Amino acid sequence: MKFSRIKISIVAFTLLLVASLFSGCAERNPTDTNEDARLTGNSKILVAYFTWSGHLKTISHWIADETGADYIRVLAKDPYPLTYNETVDRAKVEKDKGIRPAINVDFSAHDYSQYETIFVGFPVWWYDLPMPMWTFLENMKLEGKTVIPFFSHEGTSDGSAAVPTVVKLSKGANVKAGDALSIRGSKTAKSEEEVRAWVKKLGFGKK
């Protein structure tokens, strides 16, 4: 009986550890798998975000509304599974092998040089930046631009290695790592006031 209890405790701890490693996901809205972009060419601010659960879409739209920014959702061309566990497994393989998934952003079809400030949004996956955002940042010409990270999590409130990775990949950019916004994924729906206040503190809010 004692052995069984220990075994159950180990299994429970393992499941909890996986959930914390793959922070910021929670439950996915299975209908929210479409591209999402507004590239007007009239703004010098871009919000570029990756999301699986949909949390970052909500936050990104608040930021875009507050700043008048253009926005684009970064998607892997090979869509992630709808189920949490399958997505966790794929994300781990991509991270361990350093795989850069092909993404939907066509850098040759749109001129991104007009943007002076880029808000970069993502969930924390396996203590780091999701690999599709590695693809995005490595292909985006960021020299001389300002990059501001924001992310969702379910326990890794400091972003762990994710924000330092954004700094590393944003070559030549001024990354506002100390100003990164951290939002618990499960509290996204009630975070609008916090998000808008953060944008205003950065000096980008509506007049």
Image: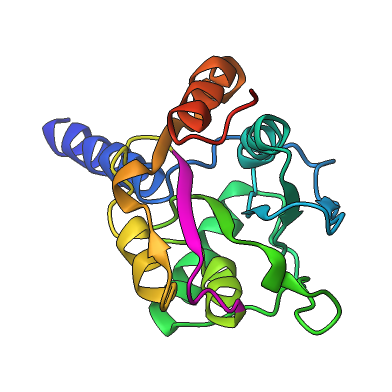
Q: Is residue 104 above or below residue 130?
A: below
Does 73 appear in magenta? no
Which quadrant of the structure image shows residue 65?
top right
Q: Is residue 2 visible?
A: yes
Q: Residue at x 66, y 36 (%)?
A: 67
In this rendering, is residue 60 above or below 90? above
Quarter occupied by the C terminus: top right
Q: Residue at x 20, y 32 (%)?
A: 5
User: In x, y percent, where is residue 143?
Assistant: 49, 77
Q: Residue furthest front?
A: 207
Q: In the figure, is residue 189 to the left or right of 146?
A: right
179 and 30: which one is in front? 179
Q: Residue at x 81, y 50 (%)?
A: 33
Q: Nearer the viewer, residue 155 or 112?
A: 112
Q: Quadrant of residue 98?
A: bottom left
Location of the N terminus (image quadrant):
top left
Q: Is residue 147 magenta?
A: yes
- Give how far across and how far down residue 145 sits, in percent: 51, 66
Q: 4 or 13: which is nearer to us?
A: 13
Query: Residue 164 location, x and y as percent?
Result: 30, 62
The residue that appears at 53% across and 51% down in the rendered structure is: 122
Q: Which residues are magenta?
A: 140-152
Q: Position of residue 130 (x, y in %)?
A: 50, 62
